[in-house]
C-alpha cells in the first residue's frame, strides 16, 4: 500500500485536535459539522493516498468479479478509473466492459431496503449517490434516510453522555453553592433530554425494513 503523503493529513490532524478537546463548544455550527462528519470522512482521507489495487492484483484480476464485488459493497463505478491508474504502472489495462458488466449485476444486490437501512444507521450518507440511477433507488433511499435519522439521534445521545460526564466532574469539584445549583439544573435538563432521545430511538428502530 502506498503511504499517504503527510501534507494530505494536515487538515485531518487539525480536526482531530479540535474534536479531542473535552470542552469543545458544540454551539458552534462549524465545530458541530466538523466533529460529526469527521469519523465518516477520515477513512477517505487516509485511503486517498493508497493504491486501489496492487501490481499483483492487476495481473490476476477477473474484472467482472472485481466490478461485481465493488458494486455489492456500495463502491461507485468510477472506481474503475483508479484501477486504470494503478494498473498502468505495470502496463495492464483493465477490461472496462467486463468490469461494468459485473458492476451492473452487483449494484442491484446492494441497492436494497435492508442495505439502505444498514448504511444509514452507520452514518454512510454518501452511498445515496451510488444507487441514484437504479430501479430500487426509491426504497433504498427511504430506508437510508430513516437509518440516518436513527444514527443522528444516537450521536446526540453519545454527545450528551460526554457533556453529562463533563458537568458531573465540574459539580464534584464545585465549592460555590450557586455554581452547584446551576450545574445540577443543567444535568437535570440533560437527563430529561436523554430520556426523550431514548424514546425517539425506540420509535425510529421500528421504521426499519
Image (cartoon, helix red, strand yellow):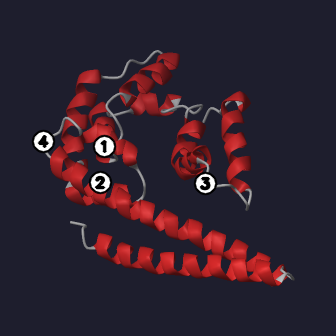
Would you name the residue on which mark 4 appears? 135
Q: Secondary structure at mark 1?
A: helix
Task: Where is residue 106? Give x, y as percent.
Answer: 23, 43
Task: Where is residue 159? Give x, y as percent.
Answer: 58, 65
Mark 1 and mark 3: span between their CA atoms?
A: 29 Å
Mark 3 and mark 2: span between their CA atoms?
A: 27 Å
Q: Secondary structure at mark 3?
A: loop
Task: Where is residue 20? Give x, y as percent.
Answer: 71, 56
Q: Nearer the viewer, mark 3 or mark 2?
A: 3
Mark 2 and mark 4: span between their CA atoms?
A: 15 Å
Callouts 1 and 2 close, C-beta under 8 Å: yes
* Residue 112 visible from this viewpoint: yes
Task: Residue at 36%, 22% (x, y): give it.
Answer: 94
Residue 68 is left or right of residue 171, and the answer is left
Residue 39 is left or right of residue 88, and the answer is right
Please, is residue 190 above or below residue 129 in the view? below
Would you name the residue on which mark 1 appears? 128
Of residues 174 and 66, the one nearer the viewer is 174
Amino acid at each position: 500500500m502506498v503511504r499517504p503523503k503527510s501534507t494530505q493529513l494536515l487538515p485531518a490532524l487539525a480536526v482531530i485536535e479540535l474534536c479531542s478537546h473535552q470542552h469543545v463548544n458544540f454551539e458552534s455550527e462549524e465545530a458541530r459539522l466538523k466533529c460529526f462528519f469527521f469519523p465518516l470522512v477520515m477513512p477517505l482521507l487516509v485511503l486517498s493516498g493508497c493504491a486501489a489495487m496492487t501490481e499483483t492484483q492487476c495481473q490476476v484480476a477477473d474484472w467482472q468479479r472485481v466490478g461485481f464485488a465493488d458494486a455489492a459493497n456500495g463502491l461507485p463505478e468510477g472506481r474503475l478509473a483508479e484501477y486504470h491508474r494503478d494498473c498502468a504502472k505495470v502496463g495492464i489495462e483493465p477490461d472496462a466492459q467486463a468490469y461494468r458488466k459485473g458492476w451492473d449485476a452487483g449494484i442491484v444486490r446492494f441497492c436494497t431496503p435492508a442495505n439502505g437501512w444498514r448504511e444509514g444507521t452507520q452514518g454512510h450518507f454518501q452511498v445515496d449517490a451510488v444507487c441514484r440511477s437504479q430501479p430500487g433507488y426509491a426504497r433504498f433511499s427511504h430506508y437510508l434516510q430513516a437509518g440516518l435519522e436513527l444514527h443522528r439521534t444516537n450521536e446526540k445521545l453519545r454527545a450528551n453522555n460526554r457533556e453529562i460526564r463533563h458537568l458531573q466532574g465540574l459539580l464534584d469539584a464545585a465549592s460555590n453553592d450557586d455554581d452547584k445549583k446551576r450545574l445540577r439544573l443543567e444535568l437535570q435538563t440533560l437527563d430529561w433530554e436523554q430520556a426523550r432521545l431514548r424514546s425517539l430511538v425506540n420509535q425510529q428502530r421500528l421504521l426499519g425494513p
